[in-house]
Image (tube, helix red, strand yellow):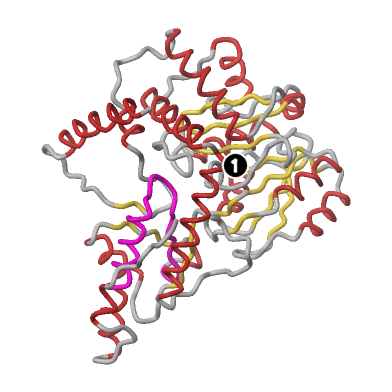
Amino acid sequence: MNRLHEDSTRVLGYIEGILNYNKKTTSYVLLNPGPVLTSPRVKAALVHHDMCHRDVDFSVLVQNLRKKIKKVFRGGDEHEVLPITGSGTSAIEATIASAIPRDKKVLVIINGAFGERYLEVAKVHKMNIEVCNFGWANNVDVDVIEERLAADPEIAAVMMAHHETSVGLLNPITAIGALCRKYNALFLVDAVSSLGAEDLDVIRDNIDICLSSANKAIHAIAGVAFVCVNDRAWKVMETIEPRLYYLDLKRYRKYATEQEQTPFTPAVSSFFALDAAIDELLEDTLEKRLELYRQKKAFMRRGFEGMGLEFLTNFGNESHTLSIVKVPDYITFASLYTQMKEFGYILYNCKDSLEDKYFQISNMGNLSFDMINQFLGTLRLVLSRAQRSTQGATSALSETEEVAPFVVKTW
């Protein structure tokens, strides 16, 4: 393992040399919720001999990758994992368009931007849609979902996010999965920003189709999404006439099970990077990765609280990968973003009605505690300067305090 790490680090050195030669891009610490910072090993995996995607060597890669990703989903023999070249939204559309019978309804659960995206996709395909909209940054009421399912046997599937990234909330997938089994509806779950960082089990949670993406808590690069589908969902999909060509899950299943390939040309290099990232995760163990995310989130939250910053919600079911922080009155988000970028940090604005009022800080990816510590110290400095500029000579922070780093005694 040490040899592998040394080889990856050496290759990364070559890569960094190339990046620094006649390139316009700059290295930043990414605090946006994907794409994320990647490890030397993942970067090194992008440098490989050219490969034909129809060759047996690529089939071996796909076969191994599908088995390993299934472990992250905690799937069993009744599950198939299918990789798709595209963003997480490609897997969302593939799932919705492949799994809803034309004469039945889909219940879309909304408490943020991505719930609204499921609705947009379903409308494009002219589906029979029922909507349960709890409003942005509100919790999902399980009793309301049961009332809707009990009242309408035509609902064939329920679609929701595990982590509604736009508001930073974890939704009750275990409880709703149990309801879907009780009322014989498929349960479709978007785990794009939760897989690899949050407690999710497709068997325990009764998830029939679970989708995710490589470039968030899996710590790979953008370009590959994947779905985990059980036998119960396949029985339904076998009866559905395809609505799509490129994103038809039945087509992906045929190529995967018969040839260990994809139906169309994949992003080969992204598959190599994803394979390396999954290996890192499984070698660390999923349990340790989940605990590490909890520690990083807690440390980051303590830092924000120490600066007197406020959060969008404090329900207790916030995600472990993301903080939604209120922009202080004495600075604009645009100014905060620009100043932090000058120091080498990329922040992320919120969407729609939260835009410019709140910002997102992600602790996804290959982000060390030292990086988080330095980020918090820099943020403290920038906010202190802005506060003094607004209030004049008076400031809540002294010159000494504003540059003092946050000290981490234990992880």
Give yes or no for residue 311 being in the magenta stretch: no
Vertical placement of residue 134 versus 71, above or below: below
Quick one: SS at disc 1? helix
Q: Amino acid at mark 1?
A: Val
Residue 37 image position (x, y, % from top left): 35, 45
Residue at 55% over, 61% down: 167
Pointer 1 local density, CA inside 10 Å: few below 14, some 14–19, many at least 20: few
In the displayed structure, does residue 94 sit left or right of residue 402?
right
Residue at 57% over, 42% down: 287
Residue at 76% over, 28% down: 232
Residue 242 image position (x, y, % from top left): 65, 25
Residue at 26% over, 60% down: 341
Residue 28 image position (x, y, % from top left): 27, 51
Farthest residue toward the top?
A: 56
The quadrant of the picture occupied by the C terminus is bottom left
Q: Nearer the viewer, residue 401 or 218?
A: 401
Name the residue that disc number 1 marks.
Answer: 124
Span colored in magenta: 356-381
